[in-house]
Amino acid sequence: MFPDRFCQLLWFSVLTLPLTACSEAGGLDVQRITSGGMLYTVAAVDLKRDRLSLHWKNPTTGQPYRTFEEVGARLRKEGQQLLFATNSGIYAPGLEPLGLHVEEGRTLVGLNNARSGGNFALLPNGVFWVKGGRAGVTETQAYRRLNMQPTYATQSGPLLVQSGQLHPAFNKAGTSFKVRSGVGVCKDGRVRFAISAGPVNFHSFAVFFRDALGCPDALYLDGSISAYATPDANTQLADFAGIWTVSR
């Protein structure tokens, strides 16, 4: 269980209401934040202290982990404790990542250059990557040109925020409301994963990352099935392909 601690009221912007709950384990900080009338669960990851990694297939069985519980069991066998987990980018039938998937420096699925077909291809899309103690969210073609060799990476789309600018297709009056999850790299250097508690449109979700969390770059991960787990909570209702974990 996460030890409870007193959380002072934090104000991020005129859109954000006070922080409602807060828990901490190691360097990981998990908060419940209300912004623009929506409740979000936000995990702030400090790569200098937290172990952030990406998982798809169990090396013992060769099959996708599918659930947070299965990943957690594997980590326990390796002497680690799972502190936080959430699904990574959009995936195809058969629990196959739809875009780039890199684990421990190995590219298991290559970049996807699709220009049509659902949210993934709502360009610009991008890649969330981790290399040593650094992380970033980079537009797909810019990522290709960098010829980067990351430790972990996942591709998804659309980009929510790019260099402080919202995706050009987002509309404040947008009528597509879904549970949404995303990841941003923020001004304080931390990586932040966020999952909405209820349906929200892309514009509001992107504004949350930029204005409330202070992330100039952020990537949409997935929609209605998005979920997270901590030592004392698990919201998963569907099987997943890639799973991001924070452990110690």
Image (cartoon, rainbow, N blue to C red):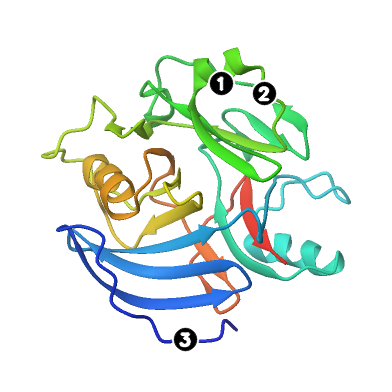
Within 10 Å of disc 2 (Cα), the crowding (few <14, some 14-19, many 20+) is few
Foreground: 126 or 61? 126
Quarter of the C terminus within the rendering = bottom right
Measured along the vertical axis of the image, is residue 53 above or below residue 227? above
Where residue 170 appears, x then y in whole percent?
Answer: 22, 32
Name the residue at the left extreme.
173
Q: What's the residue at 36%, 24% (across, down)? A: 122
Determine the image quadrant of residue 195: bottom left
Identify the residue under disc 1.
143
Q: What's the residue at 64%, 57% (across, down)? A: 245
Mark seen at residue 8 = none
Foreground: 193 or 61? 193
Label 1 vs 3, first from the N-terminus: 3
The residue type indicated by label 2 comes to Met
Number of marks drawn: 3
Identify the residue under disc 3.
5
Where residue 64 appears, x then y in whole percent?
Answer: 72, 47
Q: Disc 1 and disc 3: Cα gap in Å?
A: 39 Å
Q: What's the residue at 62%, 28% (across, down)? A: 100
The residue type indicated by label 3 comes to Arg
Where residue 3 appears, x then y in whole percent?
Answer: 55, 86
Identify the residue under disc 2.
148
Label 1 vs 2, first from the N-terminus: 1
